[in-house]
Image (cartoon, helix red, strand yellow):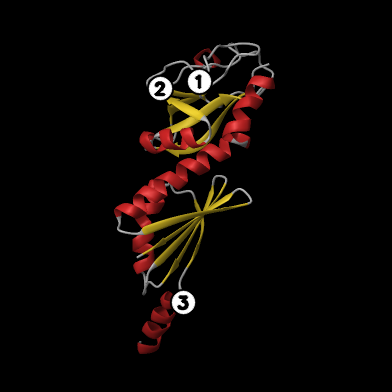
Amino acid sequence: MSHIVRQPADIIDLDALSVACRRRGLEFRPNKTHHAWWGRFVGDSPGIAGVDPSLYGTCLHAIGEKGTIPSDGYGGHWEIGLVANPNGRGYSLVFDNYGESGRRITALAGENLSGLIQEYGVEVATRKMQRQGYRVTRAETAGKVRLHCYR
Amino acid sequence: MREIIITFDGADVTIETKGFKGAECQKATAELEKALGGRRTSETLTAEYAKVATDAKTKQ
């Protein structure tokens, strides 16, 4: 009952991530060193390559559903953990996608966290382009976000 | 006017540039790509890029 996975995301700007979390109904929990999940690895999924299962659940920061109290195990409010990116830059995201608790995360952050990762990219790009003097408008169609930057 | 259109589709990112000359568009988007963690999946070069490249080849 533990389907913990890691998503490659290259998260660098934690302030932009915090904004992205708010837009998805999530909250960024800085310096939280445990993210709630099933609580113990029972070997029913591949797990995270290269990481000792005893370390599952440890993280550097966490993300949870806004206004909830996290807890491990069945029915708990589980969280997304930020861990050091194995590629050496920034953070990647880990979470347990099992059962109802995993589905609650997926409902907010998107399948494989793609919605949260997308929103993070949108916020990073918006800030970067505005700093370069561009005006930025945003449009959404069928889940895609289009930034039109001009100057 | 210079335009950069960035499309996000899940974890995939597409960058399109308009109104830049030569390799200016690649310079303009390099910092953006770095900030996005190199997740760009495709790039559309402007007509101006093609024109400058063709002109340079003709002059050789």
Residue A144 shown left or right of residue A60 in the figure: right
| Res A145 label | none
Sequence order check, earlier mark of 1 and 2 = 2
Classed neighbour count for the residue bearing mark 3: other residues with Cα under 10 Å, few (<14), some (14–19), many (≥20): some
Percent across and percent down for residue A126 are: 40, 50
In the displayed structure, would residue B39 be above or below residue A64? Answer: below
**Distance of label 1 from label 2 (alpha carbons):** 20 Å
In the displayed structure, would residue A75 be above or below residue A135? Answer: above
Q: How many marks?
A: 3
Residue B30 shown left or right of residue A38 in the figure: left
Residues beneath discs 3 and 2 located on the same chain: no
Disc 1 sits on a residue from what chain?
A
| Res A67 label | 1
Element under label 1? loop
Residue for point 48% across, 48% down = B39
| Res B47 label | 3
The amino acid pointed to by label 3 is Ala
Residues beneath discs 1 and 2 located on the same chain: yes
Q: Quadrant of the C terminus of chain A?
A: bottom left
Residue A41 shown left or right of residue A99 in the figure: left
**Distance of label 3 from label 2 (alpha carbons):** 46 Å
Q: Quadrant of the N terminus of chain A?
A: top right
Of tags 1 and 2, which is closer to the observer? 1
Q: Which residue is mark 2?
A: A60
The amino acid pointed to by label 1 is Gly
Percent across and percent down for residue A99 are: 69, 21
The amino acid pointed to by label 2 is Leu
Do labels 1 and 3 touch, CB within 8 Å?
Answer: no
In the displayed structure, would residue A99 be above or below residue A89? Answer: above
Do labels 1 and 2 touch, CB within 8 Å?
Answer: no
Element under label 2? loop
